[in-house]
Amino acid sequence: MSAEYILALDYGEKRIGVAIAHQIARLPRPLTTLATTDTVLNGIRDIIAQENIGLVVVGLPRGMDGGYTQQTRAAETFAEQLGAVVDVPVELADETLTSIDAEATLAGTAYSKGDIDAQAATLILERYLAEHPAERSAA
């Protein structure tokens, strides 16, 4: 059976927001938030196995001028480390302003910082899917 889902990660120093979408239905949703610890790569590897993940997308933050920041480099390093321990492709995707957009989406509800991170991962995945249309098979 081929992998059916795409996982998106909003990497942060304290937490990693996680979202998921089916490769055909392409409707991203928040999945969870993980603490950024020494064992987080194992936790992500477990999610990949449990959820039948075929691709991981890691959000790539940039400065307001579009340039690289310390957080940009940290996300790239995280994606490289993850790619070294999982058997699925790991790609980077722009995450500009997703945390601000996530907070706006959650406005009017009771939410935690972890909820913002998971919603930001959902927005990263939504953007990624919009930029990578589904391949249509010939009928």
Image (cartoon, rainbow, N blue to C red):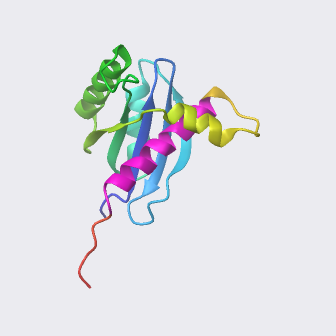
Q: Position of residue 26 (x, y in %)?
A: 44, 60
Is 130 magenta? The answer is: yes
Q: How many marks?
A: 0
Give the image quarter of residue 65.
top left
Q: Quadrant of the C terminus?
A: bottom left
Q: Position of residue 33 (x, y in %)?
A: 55, 33
Q: Position of residue 67 (x, y in %)?
A: 30, 22
Task: Return the residue nearer the eye: 71 or 8.
Answer: 71
Residue that appears at 46% across and 23% down:
12
The magenta segment is: 114-133
Give the image quarter of residue 22.
bottom left
Q: Position of residue 5 (x, y in %)?
A: 40, 55
Is 105 magenta? The answer is: no
4 versus 19 height, above or below: below
Task: Return the residue nearer the eye: 74 or 43.
Answer: 74
Residue that appears at 38% across and 28% down:
41
